[in-house]
Amino acid sequence: MKISIVVPVFNEEESIEALYPKLKESLNKEDEIIFIDDGSTDRSFEVLRDIAKDRTVKVIRLKRNFGQTAALAAGFSEAKGDIIIPMDADLQNDPKDIPGLLEKIGEGFDVVSGWRKKRKDSFFTRRLPSLLANRLISWITGIHLHDYGCTLKAYRKDILRDIKLYGEMHRFLPALCAISGAKIAEIEVSHHPRRYGRSKYGLFRTFKVFLDLLTVKFIGTYLTKPIYIFGGMGIFLNLFGLFLSVFVVIRRYLFSGEWISPMILLSFLCIILGFQFISLGLLAEIVIRIYYSAKNQPSYFIKERINIE
């Protein structure tokens, strides 16, 4: 069983020099390592080119920074292994956890997700938002995992074959795989403090997670029956409008109130506009997927390949 390790890299020149020998210790000779340079502006690509003297190491250099999802998609498309394991390049994931992931895959699971139970990050800026996001994602998708944000996971290649990654959807891969019928497990993995550079994540990503989560829920539940969600919104708005109309009539005749209140008009405006924007966002997600699928065009552009035929 051949293993493909997929590692997105963005300005991690010091980390990847230390990561490469650790990966080699955890892999067999026939396994491969795929580094994706996601538009680094430091010496990351020069370091990767030197590492690629090892023919089991493949390097993909993207033309600019497209984001972690696009980098992972580029690595997945070139992976030849039966099992694909993505991981971060910042040394916070531990290659020694790879055998544990493979052992769980051997028990018949299609996806094994890492859980950084003892996470070495700031509580208020990283761990608390992550805790809340994980609970929200689990509740909405119905796939209960402790740590959706952990990059270290193991996937059977055939499960990933029909999944198209766009935007920043990589964190929802287990949920997307579950939609395809994948059997999912979770194991504890190690997590180390960052030794070099600085994190590329911030609190602002929490809002992106919520918006992406709406897309995943829509794809998983309503993609083939959108009338359920849009019709439901219409019924809710009609009932709400009827309730407000009855309230205004009762207030007018029983309490000598005004027929038209600025507060009521403002409420109607905000609610209707809110639902319109959400609906347009979901429709746009569908249009983007149709566009890329029809053109068979990825969401990234490759500048250079090393050790890839």
Image (cartoon, rainbow, N blue to C red):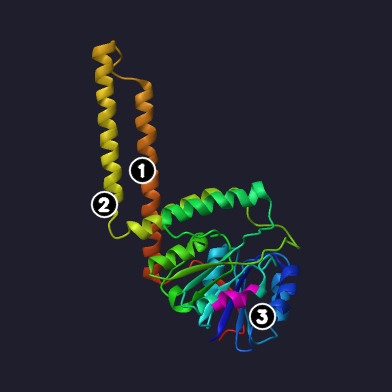
Magenta region, residue range: 97-103
Task: Place residue 32 in its image quadrant.
Answer: bottom right
Q: Position of residue 6 (x, y in %)?
A: 59, 74
Q: Disc 3 on helix, strand or loop?
A: helix
Q: Measure the alpha-carbon separation of dots 3 and 2.
A: 50 Å
Q: Secondary structure at mark 2?
A: helix
Q: Amino acid at mark 3?
A: Ser
Residue 16 image-quadrant placement: bottom right
Look at label 1 and name its amino acid.
Answer: Gln
Mark 1 or mark 3, earlier in chain:
3
Tell whether 46 sits left or right of 130.
Answer: right
Q: Which residue is mark 2?
A: 227
Q: Amino acid at mark 2?
A: Ile
Image disc number at residue 276: 1
Residue at the far top in the pictured view: 256
| Nearer mark to the viewer, of 3 and 2 | 3
Local SS, label 1 = helix
Front residue (pair 217, 168): 217
Tag 3 residue: 26
Marking on residue 2 = none
Decide which of 73, 136 is in the foreground and name it: 136
Quadrant that contains the C terminus: bottom right
Residue at 35% from the left image edge and 25% from the top image edge: 264
Q: What's the distance in space between the residues labelled 2 and 1, CA to CA?
A: 15 Å
Image height of 92 relative to 201, above or below: below
